Amino acid sequence: MQQFLRLKALAIATAAALALAACGGGGSDGNAFYPPAPTAAAEPALAPASPESAGFSSDRLKTVIETAHAFVDNKKGAAPPGIALYVARHGKIVLDDIYGKSDLASGAALKADTIYRIYSQTKPVTAVAMLKLYEQGKWQLDDPVTRFIPEFANLQVYKGKDDKGNAILEPASRPATMRELMTHTAGFAYGLVAGESDVDDMYRASNMLGQPGTKAFIDKLASLPLAYQPGEKWKYSIAMDVQGVIVERLSGQSFSQFMQDNIFGPLRMKDTGFYVPEDKRSRLATLYGVDPASGQIAPYTSGLFLLDIFTNPPVLPSGGGGLVSTTADYARFAQMLLKGGELEGVRILKPETVKLMMSNHLSDKVQAYLQGNKVPVFPGAGFGFGLNGAVVVDPAKSPLKQGKGTYTWGGAAGTTFWVDPANDMIVLGMIHVLGLSGSLASLSPSIYDALTDPSK
């Protein structure tokens, strides 16, 4: 299956929180809507435990580890320099394995605090930022996107070329909705792969991901046609970057600051952001790509995917792929989703909002389109799509053995995660090689085979 999976406590005093709540939120700090963190130290949300205490077989998990290590040690094809695997069930960490190198030239070892570019694994975090504002009544799923981005009022739809090679355009039948914006069904393209479509090539020629700021980004996007009429198809797209602009407009903050104030700070995700400070750069894993000529990996030093993570503040923080993070940080984010929006006494979202995020939002028309077509990046049979991430709707149709309701996505350099409420577990896999995204999917069935006693 061709898919991405192939795999301070809250620092707001009680009085300040109450004052903000009394002011109707007092600006953009969504945590003002929830009680502050308890003063006593909360029980750790995630702690090491024996595999058997959470229903896993140690011997079978060893097989998972051996398979992961063999992937790194493969000498016959492209292989990541290192890999980190993390599995937790009921808050018990049953697998936290780190193997290999973060940099081949120096021989630096991959470590627990290694920082990765997580690329599209940013998208679920952007969904949480959007839903913070949703809970404040700032937007609804069926609102037109033009309510927040009026520059999109006159979008055109690409219909092909005439006999002279000129683009044939027609007006969009209606504005896309916020639901469509968060499910890749709004009509936008991405421009990540040359030749994928004429509209994708227009995005690439326009350097959509390299615009010098949010205004330039929106203006340029508004000048390009949609790839299809809103709501007609599923197509991986730049929509989550548009969401970053919406967060800024609704909150009055920069996107990066909103993320820090409302997600990273409260969850104590200390190494996650759109920027790697100077004192942390030695921990950043070297980014590799697969050399088409040799089939081996080589340092990736230029190209579309070399997003700027060294300028602060970011010129254009990408809601679709701009974050860096660590295994431990992202595990805290995933565990927050698993526990219905709360972690160690700090509530980020209400349980019903998390359920909304992790529910399938695709229309019957789009679901039928996906069943009848091979669509790039979509994870395949058995999946629908929630808000900024895929959702397992029929486990029997998927070979991955993930439970119904599992929410998942991954990044271009091979990072991946999923939250499986049916089995009360989270899984993360981290590598750092462009061209190997989706390569960790093969580990999913063996991870579930290791869960020999789900009753525990």
Image (cartoon, rainbow, N blue to C red):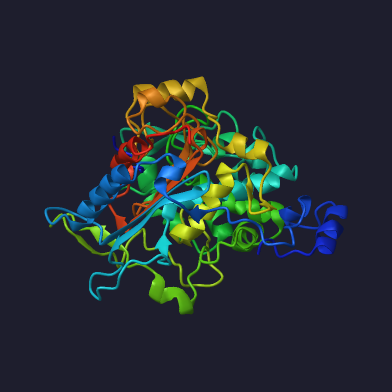
Where 393 falls versus 99 (above or below)? above
Q: Position of residue 279 (x, y in %)?
A: 47, 79
Q: Position of residue 111 (x, y in %)?
A: 37, 67
Where 409 falls versus 35 (above or below)? above
Left or right of residue 253, residue 295 in this image: left
Query: What residue do we see at 28% from left, 64% from top?
Result: 300
Residue projecting furthest to the bottom: 279
Query: What residue do we see at 23% from left, 74% from top?
Result: 105
Q: Position of residue 310 (x, y in %)?
A: 46, 72
Where 222 falls versus 14 (above or below)? above
Left or right of residue 276, residue 134 in this image: right
> In which quadrant of the rendered view does residue 267 lie?
bottom right
- Asked whether residue 439 appears in the rendered view, the answer is no
Where 261 falls versus 62 (above or below)? below
Out of 228 and 86, give the one closest to the viewer.
86
Out of 338 and 21, give the one closest to the viewer.
338
> In which quadrant of the rendered view does residue 305 lie?
bottom left
How many badges with numbers are in the image?
0
Out of 379 and 408, give the one closest to the viewer.
408
Q: Position of residue 110 (x, y in %)?
A: 33, 66
State which quarter of the image contains the N terminus.
top left
- Asked whether residue 236 appears in the rendered view, the answer is yes
Left or right of residue 273, residue 304 in this image: left
> In which quadrant of the rendered view does residue 139 lie?
top right
Out of 3 and 10, give the one closest to the viewer.
10
Left or right of residue 293, residue 453 in this image: right
